[in-house]
Amino acid sequence: PQEWQLEMDSFFITMESGSEKLQGVPLLSIIDQVIPNHLDYQVEVISLDGEKYSISSDELFLQEDKIRIFILTTDSSIEFILGSIDGEVLGNKIIKIEVTR
């Protein structure tokens, strides 16, 4: 499903190299494609180095569009970043999103 792409917009994210304007989409929009109706579930976002960010469906629903997956593109790569609309980076180099009930 590609409907979540319609919800993309841009925010400034604080990276190690400074503030960058990145496009992102609410994590909830992505999860809704897999598990609609906000059922009880747990989400783990996993980075390349094995770091995990966990959030429950209740917390994710309360955050609505504040927690997002952002896309950082360079000349040679594309990187997915978990962050918030206030500019905080929660996870770099995201490689997997797991949803469990």
Image: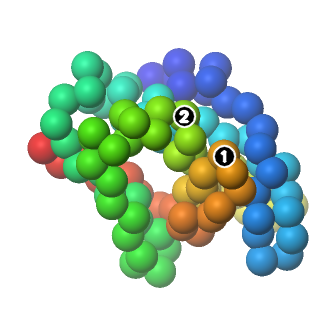
Residue that badge 2 annotates? 65
The numbered disc on residue 35 is none
Which residue is pictured at 49% across the width and 73% down the height? Answer: 48
Q: Is residue 1 visible?
A: yes
Which residue is pictured at 76% across the width and 69% down the height? Answer: 15
Say whether residue 11 is left or right of residue 42. Answer: right
Q: Label 2 is placed on what type of residue?
A: Asp
Badge 1: residue crowd in 10 Å (few <14, some 14–19, many ≥20): some
From the top left corner, tell me how far across and down residue 64 is, in percent: 47, 33
State the quadrant of the N terminus.
top left
From the top left corner, tell me how far across and down residue 70 is, in percent: 65, 49
Label located before the other in sequence (2 or 1): 2
Q: Is residue 70 visible?
A: no
Asked whether the beta carbons under mark 2 and mark 1 sit within 8 Å of each other, the answer is: yes
Residue 80 location, quadrant: bottom right
Q: Secondary structure at mark 1?
A: loop
Which residue is pictured at 54% across the width and 34% down the height? Answer: 65
Say whether residue 96 is left or right of residue 12. Answer: left
Looking at the rendered structure, the number of numbered marks drawn on it comes to 2
Residue 94 vs 1, above or below: the answer is: below
Residue 48 vs 40, above or below: the answer is: below
Say whether residue 67 is left or right of residue 101. Answer: right
The numbered disc on residue 85 is 1
Q: Label 1 is placed on what type of residue?
A: Ile
Badge 2: residue crowd in 10 Å (few <14, some 14–19, many ≥20): some
